[in-house]
Image (tube, coloured by chain):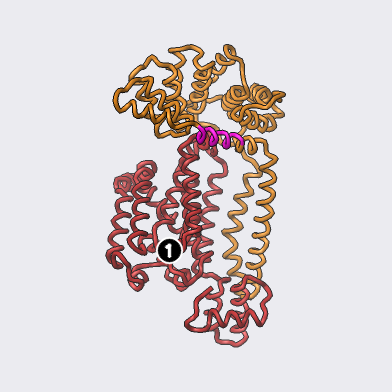
Chain colours: A orange, B red
Amino acid sequence: MSEPPPAPATNSTDAPPPAPFSWPALLPLAAVWCCAVLPVLLYLIHLSDPVLAVEVANTLCLWTGRALLVGGAVTLVGLLAFPPFPAWVRRAVDRVRRSWTVDRGPMLQALKDLEHFETAQKHFEVARLAWIRTDLQLVGPHAARAVELDPSMPQAHHLLGQFLLRVGALPQAYQAFSNAERLDPGHAFGESLLLSARAAALAGRLDEALCAYEQHAASHGGGHRSHYFYGQALAAAGRPAEAAREFALAAADPGQRLPPEEAWYRALARVKRWRYRGQA
Amino acid sequence: MKDLIDKADEVPVTLVVLIAYVTLAFLTGFPEPDSEKLAAYGWMTSLAVSEGEWWRLFTSSFLHGGLLHLGMNSWALIQLGPAVERSLGSARFAALYLIAELASSLAVCLVYDPRMPVVGGSGAIFGILGGIVALQMRQGQHALSFLDFEGPRRMLVTILIYLLLGAFIPLVSNTGHVGGLVGGFLATFVFLVPPRRPSRLLGAWRIAIVALFCGLTFYAVLPVTRWDWLWERGRLADRAALQDRYADAALKSYFGRNEVTPIDLDRFTRTELTPGTEGR
């Protein structure tokens, strides 16, 4: 994943600064120009010698095919060596395994019960099981209904926030996590606070996000994921030195096998640590 | 000019395209269209485009090859069109549709058998999908941040499944789908939606993409390395030496090799020049 280098501190009233220039960015541009000019070039060659134009085109096709083959092989090898790829595969396999091995019975039973009487707890149960099974079409409506029936249920707010964050409804996700945190400070071992900061950061509300991250670090310490999120927010806020420090913490060797989710963020942090190596 | 664009924004382009689909379906024979009518109303073959009928690059997307074809493309357009049109505005949506259609037709001209006719709006519909991807890429903090969310990820998987289906279903021009997808993506990403951070290279990219489209259109109209075009030029040449050069070039282009043998010549004569035989 590519990410632009750190931008200066955000201020919603100012226009963002232009993205920095980089020479590698010119390569695809040059490739497009080559493709654009080639037909005209072939036509000009054709005017003097039609056979030569065909020979040039055939040779180019041959070498392009070879280059694509070699490029594909190199990309494949590079992916295997690139830390986030194996971590991503492990996380994806874990998610699929969980969604396929969770028994549907309790969820179907809860759905059947809801036909006769509805309670916030039943809706929450359906939403929770559907979340584990990655059945997002069930999660949203049931979590929202649970919140509607019992607004004092922090776990329902938290689950609704997780769903909203996953589908990209960032302001609503932030609100849901904030509600969970307000009802039960430190809910889900600080997860609500962390994810509210994440939602705020993704929505571009960096001041609130940084404040929440600091609060989370002070009260719950930090894991690979929280350090990575915090580092991202610091980088976006134009504080590269602190971001580099957080990425280094997130990428630190834990000395044990991490769960897939944490391993994924550690792998991402290793790339970031490399990118910010001169900033610390 | 701004008033004109504002007025154009009120026109529901999706509906106009849908009406065009249905009207042309009835004009060309419904439910089973007549090939002669399809040819008259603008189906596209690379051969016809290289003979000067360039307008077929655009008209083919409004014609369909039967009830199922029409039904599927109309359904896809109804599903995707209104949301993208509301998001981009009608004038820009119309531009997206036409650019994607042009890209799809150019891809077909570049790769497909020159005598094979092509009809259908699926290239443009894939262009709309490409446009959606570009829209999502433009909304995040950086180009790939949209992958953090479930909806865009699922859409990418859906596009991949459609492309795989297109590769295995006979009589489906997947080349056109890929061309439309790339064209729609480029049109939206480079021209229709401005980036959140100003980019120094955006102007250069815009010129390069326009040049690419011009170059490819130039090749579609003057395919100087395509065997059928070269063979025809050879047939029309007044000098024997020139006829031989064109014949040699056509053979090399047909086989995609710079060395051709008498056996190749024999094979070419049997498959392409003997009446009543199938093409490649």
Residue A183, percent from left and from top:
43, 12
Location of the N terminus of chain A (image quadrant)? top right
| Horizontal side, residue A198 vs residue A22: left or right | left
- Classified by dominant secondary structure, the portion drawn in magenta counts as helix
Number of marks in the rendered image: 1
- Read off the chain for label 1: B
SS assignment at label 1: helix
Q: Residue B46 in the image: state x and y as whole percent.
A: 47, 69
Q: Does the magenta portion include A54?
A: no
Quarter of the C terminus of chain A within the rendering: top right
Query: What residue lies at 64% left-to-right and 41% top-to-bottom?
Result: A22
As drawn, A182 above or below B142: above
Residue to which mark 1 is pinned:
B57
Q: Position of residue B213 (x, y in %)?
A: 50, 58
Range drawn in magenta: A90-101
- Residue drawn at x 47%, y 82% is B276
Can see residue A196?
A: yes
Asked if residue A197 is positioned above or below residue B201 in the image, the reply reads: above
Q: Position of residue B123 (x, y in %)?
A: 44, 56
Residue A234 appears in view: no
* Relative depth, front residue between A116 and B24: A116
Residue type indicated by callout 1? Leu
